[in-house]
Image (spheres, grey):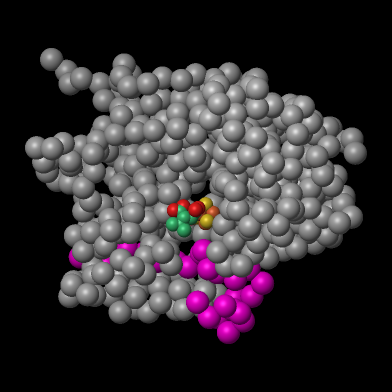
C-alpha cells in the first residue's frame, strides 16, 4: 500500500516535529529565526535567566521598523528611543555572535524582503520571526509564521517552538490576470471574498494557474497578506520560478543539486485533502482599492462606498458608520475620483524590484499631482541598488516622487514617517487599520501601479486607463 497523499504543509510539519504532547501541542525544530528591533524584550529575558541563544548561526537580525528613511546615519535619528532600538539590536547580535545586517550596510532592509533576497528563506524550511507578516516567506515553499515575544525568547533559547497543528486551506485561482492587475489585487480580492477572519486557524496553500503564473515577487506579495485573511501562514509550491529566483543568492545551499531534489518532493501530492477549499476566477479580478479599516473592505476601482444598511447586523452597522466617519466617506461615493494627499509605495508587501518597476511604468513621463506628497521607499538596500541601476529613481524623482532609504517607514510609522490627521493615503502596504499610518490618517490599500496612478492623477483612478495611454 502506498502512503496517503500529503499536503506540502504536512510534509514540512512532519519533518520538523521533535515530539508531540498529549494536549496536542507539537515541538517543532526551527531552521531560521529572523529578528528585528522587536526582539529586544526576548534578548533581555534570556539575559535575566542567564541563557544564551542555542543556535546563533540560525538567527539573523536586521533593523527595519525604526530605520530612518531620510538618512542612513544613526546620528541623524531625532528620537533617541528609535536610535536605541537600532543600537540594541546590533549589540545583542554582536554579543551572541549572530549575523547582523546593520543600518547603512549593503544587506539591510525590511526583514521580509531581505530573507528571500539573501536566499535565507528556502523551500521546506520552518521559518519564524516575531512579526505577523512572516507569512511572506511561504512564497518559496517554506512554512513561515509570526510568533509572539515570549515565543521569540523560547526559540532563541532552544531553537524549537511549541505549536498546535493548524488546519489547511487551499485557495485556487485559475485563469489569466488582466493587464494592470497584480498579485496585490489578487490577495485583496481573496480577502474581500473570504473575510479578514476567513482563514483563521488555517495554513493557506495558494494554487492554480493564476498563482503559478506569478513571479516570485508577486507570490511574496500574496503570501505576505495571508495573515490579513486570518491565516496562520501562506505558501506556494516551489517550482522553477522559485529555483531560478534562489539560484546564486548569498545563502543559497552549496549542494544545489541535492537541495533541488529535496525541494522537488515538497509540493502537495495529487489527491491530498485540504480542510477547506476556495476557488476564484483570476480573469475576473480587477484593480482593487480598500475603503475601510479592514483589508476585507476592498472593492474593484469601479465600485462605490457601501452604506451601513449593507451590514449584516446592528453591531456591524455601527462599526461601519464609525469606519465611514473615520475615513471621511459617505455611502454611494465612487472610489474612482476620491482625492489623495499622500502616496506611499513601499512595505514588505510591495517594495520589491518588480513593484517599483510597475509603479515607474505609470510614473514615467508624468508628474505627481499638485498638492500630493508621494514617496517611494525601496524594501532593501539591494532593491534600491537594483532600481538605481535601472534608472527607476530618476523616473520617480523626475515625476516628483521622493526616493527614500529602505525600511518599514509609513507602513506603520514607528520611525516617525506618518501622515497628518485627516489626510488620505494611497498605500501599497497591508494594513488599513485606524491610526496605522498616524493618528487620524486614512489609509487605502492598493497595488504599486494603482498607487502611482493615484499620485499622478491626484485621486484614485483605474490604472488600466493610464496604461492604455490615457490621462
Ligand atoms: C512591530 C511588529 C511586531 C508588527 C507585526 O507583528 O506585524 C509590525 O510589523 C506590523 O506590521 O504591524
Ligand atoms: S513593512 Fe509594515 S507590515 Fe512589513 S514588517 Fe514592516 S511594519 Fe510590518
Queried whether the magenta region covers residue 68, the answer comes back as yes
Is residue 86 rendered to the left or right of residue 19?
right
Is residue 131 rendered to the left or right of residue 351?
left
Percent position of residue 42, x then y = 30, 66
Residue in view at x 48 percent, y 22 percent:
172
Percent position of residue 74, x then y = 55, 81
Is residue 436 rendered to the left or right of residue 157?
right
Quadrant of res 180: top right
Q: Quadrant of the N terminus?
A: top left
Front-lying residue, 314 or 306: 314
Percent position of residue 442, x then y = 68, 48
Residue in view at x 30 percent, y 70 percent:
43
Q: Main secondary structure of the magenta part?
A: loop
Q: Is residue 185 above or below residue 403?
A: above
Residue in view at x 17 percent, y 46 percent:
27
How many marks are shown on the rendered structure?
0
Answer yes or no: is residue 189 visible: no
Q: Residue furthest bottom?
A: 75
Q: Is residue 59 above or below residue 287?
A: below
Queried whether the magenta region covers residue 170, the answer comes back as no
Residue in view at x 87 percent, y 36 percent:
469
Percent position of residue 176, x then y = 62, 23
Q: Is residue 88 above or below residue 348?
A: below
Q: Residue furthest left?
A: 22
Answer yes or no: is residue 38 visible: yes
Q: Quadrant of the C terminus?
A: top right
Front-lying residue, 446 or 321: 321
**Magenta span covers which residues?**
54-81
Quadrant of res 288: top right
Amino acid at each position: 500500500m502506498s502512503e496517503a497523499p500529503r499536503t506540502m504543509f504536512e510534509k514540512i510539519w512532519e519533518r520538523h516535529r521533535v515530539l508531540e504532547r498529549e494536549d496536542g501541542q507539537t515541538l517543532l525544530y526551527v531552521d531560521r529565526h529572523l529578528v528585528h528591533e522587536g526582539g529586544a524584550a526576548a534578548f533581555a529575558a534570556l539575559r535575566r535567566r542567564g541563557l544564551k541563544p542555542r543556535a546563533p548561526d540560525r538567527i539573523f537580525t536586521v533593523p527595519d521598523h525604526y530605520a530612518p528613511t531620510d538618512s542612513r546615519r544613526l546620528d541623524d535619528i531625532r528620537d533617541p528611543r528609535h536610535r536605541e532600538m537600532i543600537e540594541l539590536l546590533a549589540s545583542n547580535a554582536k554579543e551572541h555572535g549572530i549575523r547582523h545586517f546593520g543600518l547603512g550596510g549593503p544587506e539591510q532592509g525590511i526583514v521580509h524582503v531581505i530573507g528571500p533576497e539573501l536566499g535565507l528563506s528556502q523551500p521546506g524550511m520552518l521559518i519564524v520571526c516575531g512579526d505577523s507578516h512572516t507569512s511572506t516567506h511561504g512564497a518559496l515553499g517554506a512554512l513561515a509564521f509570526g510568533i509572539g515575544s515570549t515565543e521569540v525568547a523560547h526559540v532563541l533559547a532552544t531553537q524549537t517552538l511549541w505549536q498546535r497543528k493548524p488546519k489547511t486551506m487551499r485557495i485556487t485561482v485559475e485563469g489569466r490576470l488582466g493587464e494592470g492587475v497584480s498579485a496585490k489585487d489578487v490577495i485583496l480580492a481573496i480577502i474581500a471574498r473570504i473575510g479578514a477572519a476567513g482563514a483563521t486557524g488555517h495554513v493557506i496553500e495558494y494554487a492554480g494557474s493564476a498563482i503559478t503564473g506569478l513571479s516570485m515577487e508577486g507570490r511574496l506579495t500574496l503570501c505576505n497578506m495571508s495573515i490579513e485573511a486570518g491565516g496562520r501562514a501562506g505558501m506556494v509550491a516551489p517550482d522553477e520560478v522559485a529555483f531560478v529566483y534562489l539560484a546564486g543568492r548569498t545563502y543559497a545551499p552549496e549542494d544545489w543539486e541535492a537541495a533541488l531534489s529535496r525541494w522537488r518532493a515538497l509540493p502537495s501530492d495529487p489527491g491530498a485533502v485540504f480542510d477547506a477549499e476556495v476557488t476564484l476566477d483570476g480573469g475576473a479580478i480587477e484593480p482593487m482599492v480598500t475603503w475601510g479599516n479592514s483589508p476585507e473592505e476592498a472593492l474593484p476601482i469601479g465600485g462605490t462606498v457601501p452604506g451601513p444598511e449593507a451590514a449584516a447586523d446592528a453591531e456591524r452597522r455601527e462599526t461601519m458608520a464609525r469606519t465611514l466617519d473615520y475615513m471621511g466617506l459617505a455611502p454611494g461615493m465612487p472610489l474612482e475620483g476620491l482625492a489623495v494627499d499622500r502616496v506611499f509605495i513601499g512595505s514588505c508587501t510591495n517594495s520589491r524590484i518588480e513593484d517599483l518597476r510597475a509603479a515607474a511604468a505609470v510614473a514615467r513621463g508624468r508628474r505627481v499631482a499638485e498638492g500630493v506628497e508621494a514617496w517611494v521607499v525601496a524594501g532593501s538596500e539591494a532593491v534600491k541598488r537594483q532600481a538605481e541601476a535601472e534608472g527607476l529613481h530618476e523616473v520617480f524623482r523626475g515625476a516628483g516622487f521622493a526616493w527614500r532609504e529602505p525600511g518599514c517607514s509609513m507602513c506603520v510609522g514607528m520611525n516617525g514617517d506618518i501622515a497628518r490627521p485627516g489626510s488620505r493615503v494611497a498605500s501599497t502596504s497591508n494594513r488599513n487599520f485606524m491610526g496605522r499610518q498616524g493618528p487620524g490618517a486614512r489609509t487605502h490599500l492598493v497595488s504599486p501601479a494603482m498607487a502611482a496612478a493615484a499620485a499622478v492623477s491626484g485621486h484614485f483612478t483605474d490604472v488600466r486607463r493610464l496604461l492604455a495611454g490615457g490621462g
